[in-house]
């Protein structure tokens, strides 16, 4: 594991140097970008080599008998490490020009430092081999990302987002502590090795606690409330890392705990799958209702976490109903989607970052026509959108194809697994359709048509490192989409670390499926090229002219008449009314000489809406009653501590 | 393989002819003589020999739209068994690929429409994005039915050889549901009455037609060809479903397939002649019917195969 730690040290050095030389804007940024990306390359290469080798590596450190830190890198850890290092590498490169703001050079240096901490802590989370190491890394991850979220702390909105994130990540961590507490009660050690010996009831309790704790980090509905606030508040390369990678540590946690608990009860599968279906559909419906481009992308992360959970649910049902092929297809589809979502979501956030950086607004309805002046960003964003809609020949399709194949294996089962598989397949199809509506909307409103306000008029794209990072991600999206075979082998070695009880997973059947995806992708690429050549032939020596858009007989069209994002999504939101209540404020037009009027609409998130009356207020009520305990008298506080210890002694 | 490619080419080339059948039927109901049966070829030739006018609002995406929507329709036909013959390409899971390929075509049709900055095209695009969501759910429900019956995920398993006939013998009644469900999907996906009216003259009431208002010349020809192929694709599936008889006599299968196609196009034409387009807000309910039918069909089979 020495390569791993060397990479970590390099990344930390990058952050530290950036902080020390905070006053020298250029040097500080360059040091952070170069050292962090160098560390990421090192870590990435190491992780991929470990993945293809499939040997478990481990290391342990002990400090004064207090801290026993243990690390272990198996296939699953190595896979997540590869994802983390790949995306953080590109985010670090992107940040070099994105953070180019000499006026706030200290703030940017602090950002660089916490970014390096975030990368390290995520890497440590996925390699942690005991509870202490895990929770330590987990807390560093939550705190460093909290400081990144409040980067623009002067804005009231960001303070609120940061606070919400802080509360949610710590309530989530509390559930994790409770879960680890359950494990510790039975095993009596901080290690993970004996966890499978727990009685069934304790296992269920622990799994549910972990699912809530990790689910709140991953953004599973209804624990996702912080996500659409916190992700847009951070700078865009941080949003890319948070949405693309950090929430996946929640997925890692659920997978790891599932593997450790070794409990093939069908209930787990149903729970995970149901959470996936709800998160998937509601996530994309809320995404459709957003007018802020970064909030929309954040909600779309909830949707993709849903897809990943559906895959995992299918895998777990496959395990419990003794259908190895279904199990491997489900888990591998889910893990493959982790990689794919990391790529296209960070690509989309980077594209959105470029738009926000250049126009100064996040409101989609103020933008428009950016594709004409931002060609690279625009086409990279379109590629990301195609990929996130799961369309061939892009990587999103490859991942979803495996999940579908797994889901259809469940159709031949009986009773509940059958019904649940139907739900999984149909909701995947609906999610796909909704995602298509959602992303044609973003592309159509932000990048196409005519600029709706001055903010969007003839804005150019700048920053070679920003464009480079997006170009690389767009390229990988296509490569993985057309040739998923090699990448899928990496996924399979991650799946084999899941301890599903199958001796060796044969690669041949999966290589065949990957080959089919390649065949399909090549067919469509070739056909598109053929038709494009035909089109060129048709247009040879033909008159081509330019003119205004046909206004259907109306002679004075203005840019304000264009369809807006809200009108585009209106019908679909109406269809999902019970889950996505639409609030409209409209001053009616009355009288012969009507006064000025206005219209605004917002789509409510029911989880957010009911969080206040159902959770916040009861909790506030209870703690309000207990306020007398907090009186500020230190003597009594010490008394409390003594009392608590004495009481605890009775139980030990 | 060679035979399959010839059949694929034949399908692409005859698709415009079959679409003209609908026009003939509608003319018959209107008491008119109607356009010649080769009208669509004349239109395509006319369009190809013209130039184009592009809106100043548009970008390269506008030009990619027709190419990709046409290519995806052609690709879909590659996977379809024509007259019971093995398709050009077939593998386990090709159905999913084809459905997503059609989605790719839809993405670019919508993107090309949004490129023009026209409020009318935006309106059409929003509808084109909405209705197929329900269609896709219904389509996958039908797939679940077929998978439950055959254990396969490819068109070749459903519609080539004696596969379909066997299906009718096992689960005839539910297959009737599937036929109706599929017809609703055909109507929605290919923008026919009662979901969309290809002959309407008011942009506000259009879906597909309004999205292609700004396309002209060869670009428009590609869109038209793509639409003909897409209609042929769905009609061919239905034809395979309703006339699955396998006689063993050479040429008989082809004859039945063409007869089935004629029946489908005739029914589409008759429906277009006798009922009006639904109000836009009723369309989702109409499309949901198809999902419900497919769902019931699947539930019924649970009893049948046990």
Image (tube, rainbow, N blue to C red):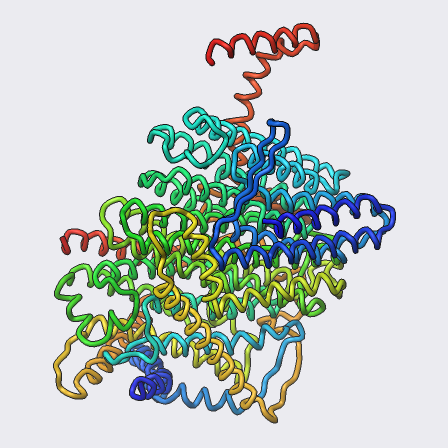
Quarter holding residue A433: bottom left
Is residue A331 shown above or below B190?
above
Where's residue A110, x and y in %? 77, 43
Where's residue B278, x and y in %? 38, 61
Residue B124 seen:
no
Task: Please tell me which residue lies in front, B99 or B183.
Answer: B99
Is residue B7 shown above or below A556?
below
Which residue is located at x 37 percent, y 68 percent?
A: A512
Where's residue B253, x and y in %? 19, 82
The N terminus of chain B sits in image quarter: bottom left
Task: Please tell me which residue lies in front, B177 or A640.
Answer: A640
Residue A550 seen:
yes
Where's residue A3, x and y in %? 62, 52
Which residue is located at x 38 percent, y 74 percent?
A: B76
Is residue A633 shown above or below A37?
above
Which residue is located at x 34 percent, y 64 percent?
A: A509
Q: Total of numbered circles in the picture?
A: 0
């Amino acid at each position: 594991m020495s390569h791993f730690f060397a990479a970590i040290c390099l990344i930390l050095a990058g952050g530290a140097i950036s902080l020390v030389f905070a006053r020298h804007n250029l040097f500080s940024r360059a040091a952070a970008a170069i050292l962090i990306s160098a560390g990421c390359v090192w870590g990435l290469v190491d992780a991929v080599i470990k993945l293809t080798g499939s040997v478990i590596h481990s290391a342990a450190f002990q400090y004064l008998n207090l801290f026993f830190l243990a690390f272990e890198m198996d296939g699953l850890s190595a896979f997540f490490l590869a994802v983390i290092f790949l995306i953080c590498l590109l985010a670090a490169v992107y940040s070099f020009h994105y953070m180019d703001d000499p006026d706030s050079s200290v703030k940017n240096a602090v950002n660089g430092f916490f970014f390096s901490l975030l990368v390290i802590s995520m890497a440590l989370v996925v390699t942690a081999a005991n509870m202490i190491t895990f929770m330590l890394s987990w807390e560093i991850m939550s705190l460093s990302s909290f400081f990144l979220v409040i980067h623009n702390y002067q804005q009231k909105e960001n303070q609120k987002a940061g606070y919400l994130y802080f509360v949610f990540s710590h309530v989530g961590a509390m559930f994790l502590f409770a879960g680890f507490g359950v494990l510790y009660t039975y095993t009596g050690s901080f290690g993970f090795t004996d966890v499978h010996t727990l009685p069934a009831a304790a296992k269920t309790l622990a799994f549910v606690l972990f699912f809530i704790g990790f689910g709140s980090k991953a953004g599973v509905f209804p624990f996702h409330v912080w996500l659409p606030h916190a992700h847009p508040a951070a700078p865009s390369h941080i949003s890319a890392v948070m949405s693309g990678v950090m929430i996946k540590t929640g997925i890692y946690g659920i997978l790891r705990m599932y593997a450790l608990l070794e409990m093939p009860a069908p209930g787990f599968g149903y729970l995970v799958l149901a959470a996936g279906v709800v998160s998937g559909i509601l996530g994309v419906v809320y995404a459709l209702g957003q007018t802020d481009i970064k909030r929309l992308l954040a909600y779309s992360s909830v949707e993709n976490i849903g897809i990943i959970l559906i895959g995992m649910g299918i895998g777990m049902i496959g395990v419990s109903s003794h259908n190895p092929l279904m199990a491997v297809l489900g888990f591998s589809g889910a893990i493959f989607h982790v990689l794919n979502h990391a790529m296209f979501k960070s690509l989309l956030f980077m594209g959105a970052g470029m738009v926000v950086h250049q126009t100064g607004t996040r409101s989609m309805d103020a933008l428009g026509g950016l594709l004409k002046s931002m060609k690279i960003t625009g086409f990279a964003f379109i590629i990301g959108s195609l990929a996130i809609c799961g369309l061939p020949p892009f990587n999103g399709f490859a991942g979803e194809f495996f999940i579908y194949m797994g889901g259809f294996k469940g159709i031949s089962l009986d009773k509940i697994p059958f019904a649940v598989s139907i739900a999984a397949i149909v909701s995947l199809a609906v999610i796909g359709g909704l995602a298509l509506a959602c992303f044609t909307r973003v592309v159509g409103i932000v990048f196409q048509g005519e600029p709706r306000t001055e903010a969007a008029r003839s804005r150019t794209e700048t920053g070679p490192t920003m464009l480079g990072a997006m170009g690389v991600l767009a390229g990988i999206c296509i490569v993985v989409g057309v040739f998923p075979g090699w990448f899928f082998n990496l996924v399979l070695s991650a799946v084999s670390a899941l301890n599903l009880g199958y001796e060796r997973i044969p690669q041949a059947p999966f290589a065949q499926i990957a080959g089919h995806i390649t065949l399909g992708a090549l067919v469509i690429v070739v056909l598109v090229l053929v038709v494009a050549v035909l089109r060129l032939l048709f247009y040879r020596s033909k008159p081509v002219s330019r003119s205004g858009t046909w206004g259907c007989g109306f002679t004075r069209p203005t840019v304000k008449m264009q369809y807006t994002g809200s009108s585009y999504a209106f019908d679909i939101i109406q269809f999902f009314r019970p889950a996505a209540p639409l609030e409209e404020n409209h001053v009616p037009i009355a009288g012969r000489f009507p006064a000025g009027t206005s219209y605004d609409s917002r789509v409510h998130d029911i989880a957010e809406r009911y969080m206040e009356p159902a959770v916040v207020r009861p909790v506030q009520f209870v703690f309000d009653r207990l306020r007398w305990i907090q009186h500020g008298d230190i003597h009594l506080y010490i008394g409390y501590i003594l009392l608590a210890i004495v009481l605890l002694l009775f139980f030990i | 393989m060679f035979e399959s490619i010839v059949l694929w080419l034949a399908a692409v080339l005859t698709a415009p002819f079959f679409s003209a059948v609908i026009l003939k039927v509608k003319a018959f109901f209107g008491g008119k003589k109607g356009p010649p049966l080769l009208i669509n070829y004349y239109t395509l030739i006319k369009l190809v020999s013209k130039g184009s006018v592009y809106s100043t609002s548009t970008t390269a995406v506008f030009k990619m739209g027709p190419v990709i929507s046409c290519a995806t329709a052609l690709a879909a036909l590659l996977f379809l068994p024509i007259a019971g013959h093995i398709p050009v390409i077939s593998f386990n899971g090709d159905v999913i690929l084809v459905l997503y390929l059609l989605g790719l075509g839809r993405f670019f049709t919508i993107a090309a429409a949004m490129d023009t900055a026209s409020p009318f095209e935006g309106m059409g695009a929003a509808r084109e994005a909405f209705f197929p969501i329900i269609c896709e759910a219904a389509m996958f429900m039908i797939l679940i039915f077929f998978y439950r019956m055959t254990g396969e995920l490819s068109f070749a398993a459903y519609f080539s050889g004696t596969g379909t006939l066997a299906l009718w013998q096992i689960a005839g009644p539910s297959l009737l549901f599937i036929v109706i469900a599929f017809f609703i999907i055909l109507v929605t996906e290919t923008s026919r009455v009662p979901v969309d009216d290809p002959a309407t003259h008011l942009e506000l009431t259009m879906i597909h037609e309004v999205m292609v208002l700004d396309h002209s010349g060869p670009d428009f020809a590609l869109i038209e060809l793509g639409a003909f192929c897409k209609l042929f694709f769905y009609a061919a599936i239905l034809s395979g479903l309703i006339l699955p008889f396998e006689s063993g006599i050479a040429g008989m299968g082809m004859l039945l397939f063409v007869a089935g196609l004629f029946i489908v196009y005739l029914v589409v034409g008759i429906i277009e002649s006798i009922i009006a387009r639904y109000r836009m807000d009723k369309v989702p309910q109409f499309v949901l019917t198809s999902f419900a039918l497919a769902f019931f069909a699947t539930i019924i089979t649970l009893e049948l195969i046990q």
